């Protein structure tokens, strides 16, 4: 049942505030200023003593892992590697009993991720799963884990599972950091409070749907798109590019913004739309100068900014404003306009957004 929406994908994009509320229910408690994940209570020793985390995943789930890496390293001071499950399983990787492997999978059935879990387990690592489909193969193969509880995802392009995965990774990083004493109590409290506010802020972002639908029409001509971001926004750029290519069949690449001058800048001309996540954070000035470089070459800039930004509004072709939040939580808001942009461009081009060609919802063969 599409619940009155023309496609499952749009329904699932709009469900995200409720999904995240469900995901955080009983886990993020603002009254007691606390984040509780049962897996951390039950397996505290294994998780706290981990010398390294290795995240294994594919596709969109791998992008969520890239955001998780930054949070775990920032707050817990434990090194994190993010691996494509398909590469990891065939590479003879170094795995020891001091490692905790985090397997991220919406379906819980992805063949490569499941094989990576089995390999890591055979080598003595402790396995933590972050999955959506209850009772699926990956959760059954792990030692413990946390479900994202976002409900069944029908659209082939993953949307609400991504934000659910990022939310669980945020809770995991916060809860672990508190146990390890690697985060100040003021930072912890500030992030917990702000995380609780995210579903309401997401609703405000979803109000931009009509505006994004309108601007999408301008860009259906494009054969290539570049997506740029830095820090926490870099994986968001990767995810935005993946969404566009899978449902609209427009070639798109996500890049760390500063890498642009090491190659992709050669592609920029007046036909090239560049989506830049340029929210107001530590990297703002640097990303602003990337936007100037794109404009100097007549590229078309679609900028995702923090509300009230007037520097970028003056130079970008299109500007999408997000509510303010803490830097590590920006991906949860910045992803939404990119999902909507991909959706509307694909719809304008008459593509089957819920079942794009050549793609399956769960990849149970390698
Ligand atoms: C992209 C997408 C895929 C999946 C990938 C992993 O929109 O849906 O890239 O993210 O196939 O799937 P799961 O998370 O089920 O292991």
Image: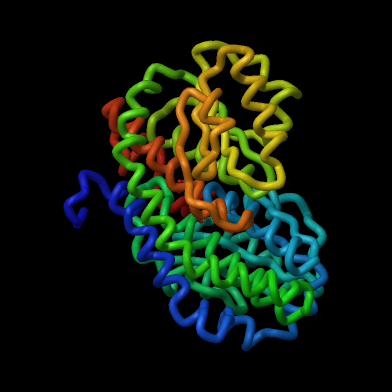
Q: Residue at x 52, y 61 (%)?
A: 165
Q: Residue at x 52, y 77 (%)?
A: 28
Residue 181's x, y, as percent?
A: 78, 79
Residue with the most extreme left position:
4
Residue 17's x, y, as percent?
A: 38, 61
For the image shown, how many numbered marks are present on the structure?
Answer: 0
Q: Is residue 166 left or right of residue 56?
A: left
Q: Residue at x 36, y 21 (%)?
A: 218
Q: Nearer the viewer, residue 138 or 149?
A: 149
**Splitting the image into 4 quarters, where does residue 189 fall?**
bottom right
Q: Nearer the viewer, residue 360 or 318?
A: 318
Query: Colour scheme of this structure image?
Result: rainbow
Residue 210's x, y, as percent?
A: 29, 38
Relative to 276, is 40 above or below? below
Relative to 218, is 149 above or below? below
Q: Residue at x 51, y 38 (%)?
A: 304
Where, quadrant-wise, is the N terminus in this rendering? bottom left
Q: Is residue 364 left or right of residue 315?
A: left
Instruction: State whether residue 134 appears in this view.
Output: yes
Relative to 134, is 232 above or below? above
Instruction: State whether residue 112 appears in this view.
Output: no
Residue 262's x, y, as percent?
A: 75, 24
Q: Nearer the viewer, residue 231 or 129?
A: 231
Relative to 273, is 84 above or below? below
């Amino acid at each position: 049942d599409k619940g009155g929406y023309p496609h499952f994908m749009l329904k699932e994009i709009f469900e995200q505030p409720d999904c995240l509320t469900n995901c955080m229910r009983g886990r993020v408690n603002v009254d007691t200023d606390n984040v509780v994940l049962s897996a951390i209570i039950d397996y505290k020793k294994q998780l706290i003593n981990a010398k390294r985390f290795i995240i294994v995943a594919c596709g969109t789930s791998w992008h969520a892992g890239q955001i998780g890496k930054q949070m775990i390293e920032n707050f817990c001071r434990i090194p994190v590697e993010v691996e494509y499950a398909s590469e990891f399983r065939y590479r003879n990787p170094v795995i020891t009993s001091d490692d905790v492997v985090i397997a991220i999978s919406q379906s819980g059935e992805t063949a490569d991720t499941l094989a990576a879990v089995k390999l890591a387990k055979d080598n003595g690592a402790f396995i933590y799963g972050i999955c959506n489909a209850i009772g699926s193969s990956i959760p059954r193969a792990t030692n413990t884990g946390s479900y994202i509880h976002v409900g069944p995802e029908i659209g082939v392009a993953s949307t609400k599972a991504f934000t659910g995965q990022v939310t669980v990774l945020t809770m995991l990083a916060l809860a672990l950091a508190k146990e390890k004493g690697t985060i100040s109590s003021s930072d912890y409290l500030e992030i917990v409070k702000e995380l609780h506010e995210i579903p309401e802020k997401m609703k405000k972002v979803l109000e931009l749907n009509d505006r994004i639908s309108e601007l999408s029409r301008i860009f259906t001509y494009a054969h290539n798109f570049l997506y740029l971001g830095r820090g926490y926004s870099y994986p968001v750029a990767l995810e935005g590019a993946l969404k566009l290519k899978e449902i609209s069949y427009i070639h798109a690449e996500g890049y760390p913004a500063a890498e642009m001058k090491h190659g992709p800048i050669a592609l920029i001309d007046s036909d090239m739309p560049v989506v830049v996540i340029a929210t107001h954070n530590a990297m703002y000035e640097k990303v602003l100068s990337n936007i100037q470089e794109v404009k100097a070459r007549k590229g078309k800039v679609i900028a995702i900014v923090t509300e009230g930004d007037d520097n970028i509004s003056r130079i970008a072709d299109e500007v999408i404003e997000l509510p303010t939040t803490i830097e590590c939580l920006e991906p949860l808001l910045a992803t939404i306009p990119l999902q909507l942009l991909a959706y509307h461009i694909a719809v304008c081009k008459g593509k089957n957004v819920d079942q794009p060609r050549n793609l399956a919802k769960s990849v149970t063969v390698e």
